[in-house]
Image (cartoon, rainbow, N blue to C red):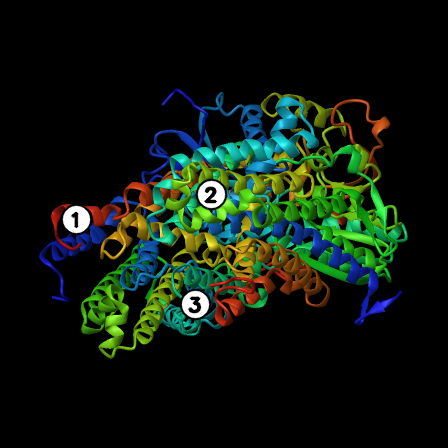
């Protein structure tokens, strides 16, 4: 199903079980944050893993998705599902424009152009206080009711919604990678001139991947805004872009479960180590360096290598 | 549970998924969370000195002797509303009964919303925005110490009365700075003055104010209004001196300056500034007595009004909880209602009361900073110029749109 | 009041002057970044953190050892440079064979560590450092009052930039360095210790960042985030100037400072973003940068 290998299918079942039991064992808000960031990281992983492009500006789509969702739900009283879809569309639209510009460049120049474009979005968020609330953020976003009927004020109800979005996201990403489309993308990654000579327009494929990554970021940002009831500059700034790269790198570039594990570890550090103040930043930096120096496959990537099966 | 403990935990305990207060039914146990800025621009006016003042309130009230087991936890909001709101949510979900302090209006507004959702008590001492008792007021939030209305009328009004008719504002661009500027602008205009310019700078990342100071200088205004606080104010006043703002005859109106900021600037630079606080340690015998008691816990930083407000607020909270009993106190609205019923009394603020919109009613004092030679003892920085009684210090009830107040 | 382009002359000149001062820092930092990239092919994301450490060392020299600004001007770059040398020998040299992006990620992690450690000890708002007595006065330029120290910064930056450019482009040592990056094996064959030469280059690059940090200490409050605020802008400067072009970095650094100054006069909210607009445009139109050779 969905092109899962046996190990991946087992992994998926374990994950579904964990998602189901999770809120009864751990703080539900924490788990919802993990799932939102996992979704965000899966998108970034599509870029890094499938087409080998490092974006330093993914937070632009994550943050704007959150802002648009928060604004629509709070100011116009739209229901949560409309807000989240709008957040995804915002990410996709922004990704379509920025991606169209960025995919013309490779490696470091691609990274730099995504950084520049994200900085422009950030400064827009700082300046346009009527829309984003500037430093105050959009506060007091009501969770209201799904489809206008199912109240999400209870954390478990909200959790169920986030879990559905997250699991659907996992299946969707997996489907993309294993579709014929995904096979072409893989061919481009491995040998771009050859793919081009076979008649594939490599830029189209890269562009579509870029848009999908941005849309996932938008959905993730919007969902997070609904969970926390607040959307601020934190989510649109350069630090968030760095964090998502760390998640992917730590979990394993190009794996299905890597970004999810990466999100779990990074968000858990921020929650459970917060009393150590800025030492969390130090640990994050150390993980970054360790991943680059000795651990370039990441945790899941290493595991997959040892087990000789994709994960 | 006979052994009573008092301890300071880090935020990790609160972040843990386990319930923070496991044995509420077993005894009279309470948890107080001090949410403040512990490392940023407002750490001197809040931070660990606020924690020390909360602790002092427990000691002065005699929590141990009364059989209470009270835990104090602290958390750093890093001046980010999302972090503050997330922390508050976590704390309230894990059984924190009172959240106090919160220097930073944007964070405070976000936390007030969470307190309402979770029906838990929030005593704001160190954020300025008068929206906390206006449009954003709720039954769970009490605003201690001071607000933007008081600052704009006291400090702003005094500058206008002294002949400062044209103003240029430098504003920290978030909930606090924006409102303080708007309210001061209204005071200036009501007195027939004008505002010739305004720059809003990003908070909390700005440390270089030179570009704004050049704009202020070329505007030709008589008064430079600083709608900022903490280290920002210290930096902007220091740099204003470097750029010869005062040499060129412009007066500086620091609309919110705390004792700790004066200490940070030094009297050489701060001398002659007018400022407003509702507490000054060297005011009378009671304030001095309070200060002497708390100083061993915070020897290098004397309490200013926001920190003294944490003391006063915690003390009154404890009295209210004692009156209605610990089980009933799990409702923030219930404790707040009880606090509003009782007059307050403590060494820092004397005898005051809390209005139905959650406004703590205390007098405010207009001070002038002493010259270097006039300061006799450590941290002796102020001369009292004028006292505004409590009923004139804050906006009249029902003028700011608090939904709790029936028209 | 004299008006130029519809703006008061004091405002225009004042902001231009401030723009040049900011440009001095852009130039000094981007120059070090360009040297490191040009010779080592490492995108040093930790450059802003090195700048920050340089400022903290300046503060530490005074507060722990009683050594003032002028000592710091010499010692801080040496200390940070030595640390850079060790860093290159122990860590950075391990990734030369990898994709260029790994260097960026590695140094990003390094920057996080340095910033986090400093924040733990000094708080996010940091410490303040006084202007040296000799330079603490104010100059009345007629159109504005300028602190003497800021004038000194522009002067010092101009000298530092010229000296560095001269050393690399016009001296024998510089020629050797450039040769070593083009063809390390050949230079090695001439009896030159190439790995050490490369480590020294890295040390020199971060030493320049530290030197800029010393100059910045009295201007901005010395805080853990002071490099983060600058690093993105400085990257933009290097990209616009052409990655690896030292002269390009210097010219672009000062130029962008001036453009920001102008933007501050005519559209103040835009001053923080104008550099990224320029960067995006340059990357799209001329990826090798204005002065790059690619």
Q: Nearer the viewer, mark 2 or mark 3?
A: 2
Q: CA–CA distance between discs 3 and 1?
A: 40 Å
Q: Is residue A59 visible?
A: yes
In the rendered image, which quarter contains the C terminus of chain B? bottom right
Q: CA–CA distance between discs 2 and 1?
A: 30 Å
Label 3 and label 1 in one chain:
yes
As drawn, C267 above or below C223: below
Q: Are marks 3 and 1 in contact (CB under 8 Å)?
A: no
Q: Secondary structure at mark 1?
A: helix
Mark 2: few/some/many CA within 10 Å (<14, 14-19, 20+): many
Q: Secondary structure at mark 3?
A: helix
Residue that label 2 marks: C111
Q: Residue B295 placed where, x, y %?
A: 63, 23
Q: Residue B383 placed where, x, y %?
A: 83, 34
Q: Residue B331 placed where, x, y %?
A: 45, 45
Residue that label 1 marks: A305
Residue that label 3 marks: A69
Residue B89 horizontal side relative to residue A255, left or right: right
Q: Nearer the viewer, residue B202 or C202?
A: C202
The chain carrying label 3 is: A
């Amino acid at each position: 199903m969905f092109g899962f290998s046996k190990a991946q299918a087992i992994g998926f079942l374990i994950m579904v079980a964990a998602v189901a039991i999770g809120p009864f064992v751990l703080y539900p808000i924490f788990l919802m944050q993990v799932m939102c960031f996992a979704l965000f990281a899966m998108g970034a992983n599509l870029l890094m893993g499938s087409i080998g492009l490092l974006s330093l500006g993914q937070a632009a789509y994550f943050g704007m998705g959150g802002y648009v969702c928060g604004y629509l739900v709070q100011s116009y009283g739209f229901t949560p599902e409309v807000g989240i879809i709008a957040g995804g569309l915002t990410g996709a639209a922004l990704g379509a424009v920025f991606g169209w510009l960025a995919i013309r460049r490779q490696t470091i120049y691609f990274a730099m152009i995504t950084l520049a474009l994200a900085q422009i979005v950030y400064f827009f968020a700082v300046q346009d206080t009527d829309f984003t609330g500037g430093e105050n953020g959009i506060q007091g976003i009501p969770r209201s009711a799904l489809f206008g009927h199912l109240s999400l004020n209870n954390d478990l109800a909200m959790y169920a919604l986030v879990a559905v979005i997250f699991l659907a996201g996992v299946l969707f990403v997996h489907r993309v990678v294993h579709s014929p489309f995904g096979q072409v993308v893989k061919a481009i990654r491995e040998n771009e001139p050859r793919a081009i000579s076979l008649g594939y327009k490599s830029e189209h494929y890269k562009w579509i991947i870029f848009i999908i990554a941005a849309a996932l970021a938008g959905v993730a940002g919007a969902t997070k805004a609904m969970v926390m009831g607040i959307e601020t500059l934190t989510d649109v700034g350069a630090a968030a872009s760095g964090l998502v790269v760390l998640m992917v790198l730590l979990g394993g570039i190009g794996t299905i479960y890597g970004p999810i594990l990466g999100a779990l570890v990074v968000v858990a550090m921020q929650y459970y180590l917060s009393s150590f103040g800025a030492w969390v930043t130090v640990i994050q930096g150390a993980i970054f360096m360790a991943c680059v120096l000795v651990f370039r496959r990441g945790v899941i990537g290493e595991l997959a290598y040892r087990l000789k099966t994709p994960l | 549970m006979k052994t009573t403990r008092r301890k300071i935990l880090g935020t990790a305990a609160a972040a843990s998924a386990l319930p923070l207060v496991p044995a509420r039914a077993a005894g009279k146990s309470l948890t107080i969370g001090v949410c403040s800025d512990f490392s940023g621009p407002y750490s001197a006016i809040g931070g660990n000195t606020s924690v020390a003042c909360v602790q002092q309130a427990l000691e002065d009230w005699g929590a141990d002797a009364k059989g209470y087991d009270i835990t104090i936890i602290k958390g750093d909001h890093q001046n980010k509303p999302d972090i503050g709101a997330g922390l508050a949510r976590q704390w309230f979900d894990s059984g924190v009964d009172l959240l106090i302090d919160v220097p930073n209006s944007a964070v405070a507004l976000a936390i007030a919303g969470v307190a309402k959702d979770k029906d838990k008590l929030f005593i704001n001492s160190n954020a300025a925005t008068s929206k906390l008792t206006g449009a954003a007021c709720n039954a769970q939030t009490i605003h201690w110490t001071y607000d933007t209305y008081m600052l704009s009328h006291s400090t702003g009004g005094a500058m206008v009365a002294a002949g400062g008719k044209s103003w240029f504002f430098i504003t920290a661009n978030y909930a606090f700075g924006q409102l303080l500027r708007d309210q001061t602008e209204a005071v200036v205009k009501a007195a027939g003055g004008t505002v010739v310019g305004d720059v809003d700078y990003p908070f909390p990342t700005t440390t270089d104010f030179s570009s704004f100071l050049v704009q202020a200088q070329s505007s030709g205004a008589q008064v430079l209004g600083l709608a900022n606080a903490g280290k920002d104010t210290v930096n902007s006043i220091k740099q204003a001196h470097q750029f010869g703002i005062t040499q060129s005859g412009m007066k500086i109106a620091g609309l919110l300056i705390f004792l700790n900021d004066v200490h940070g600037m030094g009297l050489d630079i701060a001398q002659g500034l007018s400022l407003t606080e509702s507490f000054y340690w060297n005011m009378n015998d009671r304030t001095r007595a309070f200060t002497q008691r708390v100083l061993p816990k915070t020897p290098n930083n004397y309490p200013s009004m926001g920190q003294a407000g944490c003391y006063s607020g915690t003390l009154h909270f404890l009295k209210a909880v004692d009156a209605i009993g610990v089980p009933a106190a799990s409702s923030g609205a219930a404790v707040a209602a009880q606090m509003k019923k009782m007059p307050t009394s403590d060494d820092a603020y004397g005898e005051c009361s809390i209005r139905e919109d959650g406004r703590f009613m205390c007098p405010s004092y207009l001070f002038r900073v002493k010259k270097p030679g006039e300061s006799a003892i450590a941290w002796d920085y102020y001369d009292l110029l004028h006292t505004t009684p409590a009923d004139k210090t804050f906006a009249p009830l029902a003028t700011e749109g608090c939904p709790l107040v029936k028209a | 009041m004299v008006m130029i382009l519809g703006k008061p002359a004091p405002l225009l000149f004042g902001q231009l002057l401030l723009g040049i001062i900011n440009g001095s820092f852009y130039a000094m930092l981007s120059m070090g970044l360009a040297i490191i990239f040009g010779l080592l092919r490492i995108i040093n994301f930790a450059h802003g953190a090195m700048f920050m450490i340089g400022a903290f060392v300046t503060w530490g020299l005074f507060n722990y050892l009683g050594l003032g600004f002028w000592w710091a001007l010499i010692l801080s770059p040496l200390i940070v440079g030595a640390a850079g040398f060790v860093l290159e020998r122990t860590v950075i040299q391990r990734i030369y064979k990898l994709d260029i992006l790994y260097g960026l990620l590695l140094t990003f992690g390094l920057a996080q560590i340095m910033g986090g450690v400093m924040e733990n000890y000094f708080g996010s708002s940091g410490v303040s450092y006084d202007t040296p007595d000799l330079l603490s006065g104010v100059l009345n330029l007629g159109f504005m009052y300028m602190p003497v120290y800021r004038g000194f910064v522009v002067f010092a930056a101009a000298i530092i930039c010229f000296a560095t450019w001269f050393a690399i482009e016009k001296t024998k040592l510089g020629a050797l360095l450039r040769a070593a990056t083009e063809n390390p094996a050949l230079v090695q064959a001439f009896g030159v210790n190439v790995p050490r030469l490369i480590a020294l280059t890295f040390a020199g690059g971060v030493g320049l960042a530290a030197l800029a940090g010393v100059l910045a200490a009295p201007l901005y409050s010395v805080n853990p985030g002071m490099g983060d605020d600058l690093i993105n802008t400085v990257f933009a400067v290097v990209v616009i100037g052409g990655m690896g072009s030292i002269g390009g970095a210097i010219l672009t650094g000062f130029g962008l400072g001036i453009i920001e100054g102008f933007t501050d006069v005519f559209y103040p909210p835009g001053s923080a973003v104008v550099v990224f607009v320029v960067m995006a445009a340059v990357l799209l139109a001329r990826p090798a940068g204005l002065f790059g050779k690619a």
